[in-house]
Amino acid sequence: MWCPCLICRFLARRRRRAAWLLFVPTAALALAATMPPAAAAHHERPVFRPPVDAPVTDPFRPPENPYGPGNRGVEYDTEPGDVVRAAASGTVVFAGAVAGTLHVTVDHGGGLVSSYSYLQRLGVRVGTDVDQGALIGVAGERLHFSVRLEGAYTDPAGFIGVRRVRVRLVPL
């Protein structure tokens, strides 16, 4: 029999919520168990190499808001004619001019994209698969290198260098 009082309705709501909280993790575990190993595995981020052998003149400075000032990448002090190489393997998704300057964007999979801006000359076309270290283009007086993860600009320095390995010590 249904009771219209507020206390009974409150307790019934709590029981439904508790049942839901038990159902969600159980359903997630069942779904993960049915997924193939490749789909269940976390996409591992590639280790990037610097795109040029030049000093950084302006590091990553995130803006305070989406339209605010900052540096959404890293500026390298290149000489005109310096070779620009792919920081990691991927597929070229853009290669062309924007507002009179040349740019290349490479998709590395897993929501990770890198861009190379203010090039003097392009060395790739859209759809080209590039390996790490492959020629992307020729730099102008500077190179702007940026990385986006799931559409958000991220500090490229966090991707350049040696992969951190988690070590677990066990007793003998």
Image: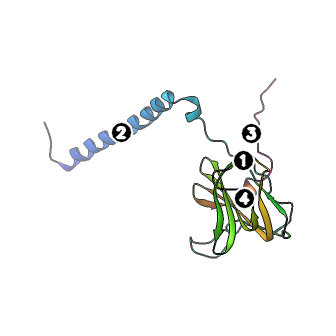
Residue indicated by mark 1: 89
Q: Which amino acid does label 1 sit on?
A: Ser
The answer to whether residue 9 is magenta is no
Give the mark nearer the N terminus: 4 vs 3.
4
- Whether the residues at callouts 2 and 3 have beta carbons within 8 Å, the answer is no
Relative to the observer, which residue lies in front, 20 or 72? 72
Determine whether the residue tagged by mark 2 lies in a helix, strand or loop. Answer: helix
The answer to whether residue 166 is magenta is yes
Name the quadrant containing residue 54.
bottom right
Tell me which segment is drawn in magenta: 159-172
Residue 26 in sight: yes
Give the mark nearer the N terminus: 2 vs 1.
2
Residue 71 in sight: no
Mark 4, residues whose alpha carbon is within 10 Å: few (<14), some, or many (≥20)?
A: some
- Whether the residues at callouts 4 and 2 have beta carbons within 8 Å, the answer is no
Residue indicated by mark 4: 156
The answer for how far apart the CA atoms under marks 4 and 1 are is: 15 Å
Residue indicated by mark 3: 166
Classified by dominant secondary structure, the portion drawn in magenta counts as loop
Which of the two discs, 4 and 2, sits closer to the camera? 4
